[in-house]
Amino acid sequence: MNNYIKNLKKYAKKDFFEGEWNNFKGPFNKALSYKNSEEGMLYWLKKVAKYHTDENTGSLYWIMKADIKGITPEKIDNATSLNELVSLLGNSDSEFLKKDNGYKDYYMPRNFKLNDMFKSSSSGTTGPAKTVYHTPQSLSISAVNEYTGIKAQYPVKELKNKKLLAAGPVGAYQEEHKKLAELLGMEYIGNEFETKGLKLLGPQEMMNKMRPVMEKETYILNQGNIGIATAAMEMISMMPKELFYGTDLIKVSGTQINTDMLTKTEKELGKKLIPMYGHYAGKSSIGFTSSDIVYFPSFPVTYIYMNYQGKTPAYGKKAPTKMIVAEPELLLINDEDYAIKTSVKKATKAFEEIDGISNLSRSLN
């Protein structure tokens, strides 16, 4: 069983999804039953949007926005397409997430508690960092996304009982990789660090701040028996390549990664590299390398919605995207990158119900 939707259904029946998830388990399972991802996403987004705009359960930001824009449960239910529903809701204002306690004060629904969730922050490259929180259930879905993609590209039996070394941000990223290690039967080892403002530092400052992280990484890699190591391409370039010789595969992140870069690094290391499109709010989207890198988001809690002048573009056409993060604990709709809508048939059967995106960039040029 290596299909993403089938894997989600399989693990949803087990205790992998902890607790009741604020009564969203039923809607989650129904969202998985639709014949295509857009219909499933329309159903799921309606449930999440009504929850967030309800005065008894919702988040302050969406309750205020619903009042100003006249968003009602009836209008949400009457939306006949994802395009119509996204237009009704409109983009969310991420500026609130840059404030101290911004998520708690504006985006956290009434029945949630920070202590039950895991923090995730942007790097703050373009200004103050934005911070949100994710539940264990949403991170479980992200872990199944990664598991499905890894299994489609690598014989996972060879990873069992080996170590998964997760070098990355504190909080949600580490929790997601604990769950991934559990799915793969691996031993999780965290190498966490604070990413806030990291990309704003000069080369020497960044090197100084990252030195303890790289020293720990070097020590663990030297111990051997590493099945998976996670790393940014910058980290790989700053470390001796022989350190990775004893690692089965490396999971790398960054929208600046391209196929030439991956192919070159794979030849240098003699190891399989699997690309990831990471996002502080949308979490993981697993990547597959062909003529380009095709990414598949962790449906239905993350959805890459392509919209160009009010029309959904055909496959192969580059267009602006919106990232929909639709979790019981977080609802965000924001303009993101430009990308090409890519049919799953050109990439992998593992995500056959879900369209992918490729050729990510910040502009059409």
Image (cartoon, grey):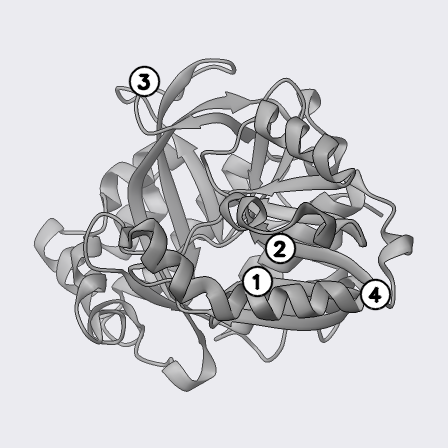
The span from disc 2 to disc 3 (Cα, nearest Å) is 30 Å
Q: Earlier in the sequence, mark 4 or mark 2?
A: 4
Element under label 4? loop
> Between 135 and 147, which is closer to the camera in this rendering?
147
- The local crowd at label 2, few if under 14, some if 14 to 19, many if 20 or more residues have their Cα within 10 Å, is many
- Ranked by sequence position, the earlier of labels 2 and 3 is 2
Q: Position of residue 148 (x, y in %)?
A: 73, 48
Three-letter code for the amino acid on which mark 4 is drawn: Lys
Q: Nearer the N terminus, badge 4 or badge 1? A: 4
Q: Amino acid at mark 3?
A: Leu
Q: CA distance from mark 4 to mark 2?
A: 14 Å
- Judge the density around disc 1: few (<14), some (14-19), many (≥20) Cα neighbours within 10 Å: many
Mark before the other along the chain sequence, 3 or 4: 4
Q: CA distance from mark 3 to mark 1?
A: 32 Å
Please report contact status of discs 2 and 3: CB closer than 8 Å, yes or no. Answer: no
Label 3: how many residues lie within 10 Å, few (<14), some (14-19) or many (20+)?
A: few
Give the residue type at disc 1: Ala
On the image, numbered disc 4 is attached to which residue? 162
- Mark 3 to mark 4: distance in Å? 42 Å
x, y percentage for residue 4? 70, 46
The residue carrying mark 1 is: 167
Where residue 331 appears, as percent x and y from the top left, is 34, 57
Contact between labelled residues 1 and 2, with CB atoms less than 8 Å apart: yes
Q: How far across and down, in percent of the image, does residue 286 sit?
A: 61, 43
Dot placed on the residue nearer the N-terminal end, 3 or 1 = 1
Residue 364 - label: 3
